[in-house]
Amino acid sequence: MGDGSYSFSLTTFSSSGKLGQIDHALAAVCQGSTSLSIKATNGVVLATEKKMATPLMDSSSIQKISPLDDHVGLVYSGMGPDARVLTASGRKECQAYRRTYHEPIPIGQIVRHLASVMQEFTQSGGVRPFGVSLLVAGYDSLGPHLFQVDPSGSYWAWKASAIGKNMVNAKTFLEKRYTADIELEDAIHTALLTLKEGFDGKMTSDNIELATVNSKCEFKVLSAAEVKDYLDEVL
């Protein structure tokens, strides 16, 4: 029996050991606009392309970068509604931890929570995998952190990573430009240059979104004016 016979079954492994619906979820991620993140010595930067179906859309209504708590946030590529569900779950977990222990949640713990939610949707009947990959950036007592979480529930720590339709070219560019001693300001410039490599059209403050988390454990989504200033410096 070929693998195609299992492509609509979430909970049944194919003869080659794959779950077809997870492959399809990864395909949905690859159709999403490019997102990337770079870990610096004193923080982490998140950058993404905000792709609008028509110029008639209000760009301010599209938000791909979401804070989870004061010190941690995420960016996604793939299906926006799925990302909203995971963002809401992550925020609840952050607040539950803060209410119980009176301190911010460690970055590794919130990543494990998100990964567990995504993994649960790969072995339950009547559901489908989340059609998103996440880049989670934060700063805690152990320093800056960057994690990638995929639809299977797998997660890894990265120095720099990219997801979405242009992730292969973006990762190749990051491999050439990344250095272990890069600082946050330089990381922002590198992130914008990486997005520019595969960008279709002109990069503006309306179609680019940036966020940073610094050594003061402050996660901040940059305003359109701040994004414009960085674009003027780089382009």
Image (spheres, grey):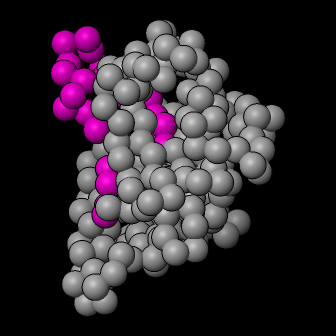
Q: Considering only vertical position in the picture, is 101 above or below 210?
A: below
Relative side of 105 to 112, left or right: left
Residue 76 lies in the magenta-colored region = no
Q: Nearer the viewer, residue 185 or 170?
A: 185
Q: Nearer the viewer, residue 203 or 103?
A: 103
x and y, in percent, of residue 223 in the image: 31, 31
Relative side of 176 to 138, left or right: right
Q: Which residue ends up furthest to the right in the rendered image?
A: 176
Q: Is residue 46 visible?
A: yes
Relative side of 122 to 38, left or right: left
**Where is residue 94, by image quadrant?**
bottom left
The residue that appears at 43% across and 20% down in the rendered structure is 229
Q: Considering only vertical position in the picture, is 137 above or below 183?
A: below
Q: Which residue ends up furthest to the front in the rendered image?
A: 216
**Where is residue 49, by image quadrant?**
top left
Q: Which residues are magenta?
A: 46-69
Q: Considering only vertical position in the picture, is 219 above or below 29?
A: below
**Numbered circles on residues, count:** 0
The residue that appears at 76% across and 34% down in the rendered structure is 177
Q: Nearer the viewer, residue 74 or 166?
A: 74
Q: Considering only vertical position in the picture, is 156 above or below 60?
A: below
The residue that appears at 36% across and 76% down in the rendered structure is 104
The residue that appears at 48% across and 23% down in the rendered structure is 230
